[in-house]
Amino acid sequence: MTECDHCGASFDGEEEYLRHLRDEHAGELSRIEQRRVEGLTESEDSDGIPTVAVYGVTLVGILIAGALAYVLLAGGGSAAEDVKTEPHSSGSVHEHGTMNVTIDGRTLDFSKDRFQMQDRNFFHYEAGSGERWHVHGQRVTLEYGLSTLGIQVTKNSVRFEGTTYNDDDEGTSVTFEVNGESVNPRDYVLQEGDHVRVIVTTE
């Protein structure tokens, strides 16, 4: 049994006594008592719930939330495919390249008005020329550039003028290449001098 020197109260254990000193006599403690109270490992919060348990439950909740976010956004599931890389910092760069898009035997002419200056901020063809595309921002993906031209794409499909061509369909082939290498248009960020080929063939 431990008795409080300040008020005479009795306590069964040392930890209970130190909590009493901390809560009831904080301004009256000697240096030795202050050090003992500071060294107290608090095992319960004010509601009698173990503090370690409270923190443990909180930590588990954070870990579960993080795991769910990873699965949905970075784990390669269907939700991850809905996350797009968006361009930013318009005017920070001025890069050029070339592009050939052939859909079901039809090669698109980017000098036509319908393809000119469709997006002033990040990606466009200009001055009546279909020879070179212009990029004026950071993180401009091939998917974004094509979308400004009315061409919607995923990693294995092309939608143009109301028709969707899917590489998974029998007799249909969809190819995305940059400088001769296969790319995912949703991920690939256009660079100075890139030559892009988008080829859709059907039987």
Image (cartoon, rainbow, N blue to C red):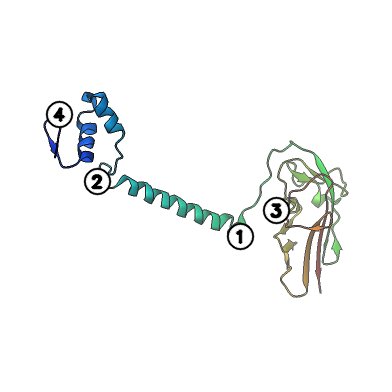
Q: Which residue is mark 2?
A: 48
Q: CA distance from mark 4 to mark 3?
A: 71 Å
Q: Tell me which label, 2 or 4, sits earlier in the chain.
A: 4
Of helix, strand and loop, which one carries label 4? Answer: loop
Q: Amino acid at mark 3?
A: Asp
On screen, residue 104 above or below 48: below
Q: CA distance from mark 2 to mark 1?
A: 44 Å
Q: Amino acid at mark 1?
A: Gly
Near-viewer residue (100 or 9): 9
**Is there a contact, CB below 8 Å, between mark 3 and mark 2?**
no
**Is there a contact, CB below 8 Å, between mark 4 and mark 3?**
no
Near-viewer residue (153 or 194): 194
At x 77%, y 38%, the residue is 93
Q: Is residue 119 left or right of residue 12?
A: right
On screen, residue 40 above or below 114: above
Q: Amino acid at mark 4?
A: Asp
Q: Which residue is mark 4?
A: 5
Q: What crowding class fits label 2: few (fewer than 14 Cα within 10 Å), some (14-19), or many (20 or more)? A: few
Q: CA distance from mark 2 to mark 4?
A: 25 Å
Q: What crowding class fits label 1: few (fewer than 14 Cα within 10 Å), some (14-19), or many (20 or more)? A: few
Q: CA distance from mark 1 to mark 4?
A: 65 Å
**Is there a contact, CB below 8 Å, between mark 2 and mark 4?**
no
Q: What crowding class fits label 3: few (fewer than 14 Cα within 10 Å), some (14-19), or many (20 or more)? A: some
* Quarter of the figure that contains the N terminus: top left
Q: Amino acid at mark 2?
A: Gly
Residue 174 drawn at (x, y percent) = 77, 65
Q: Tell me which label, 3 or 1, sits earlier in the chain.
A: 1
On screen, residue 185 above or below 203: above
Callout in the foreground (1, 4): 4
Q: Which residue is mark 3?
A: 187
Q: Which residue is mark 1?
A: 76
**Is there a contact, CB below 8 Å, between mark 1 and mark 4?**
no
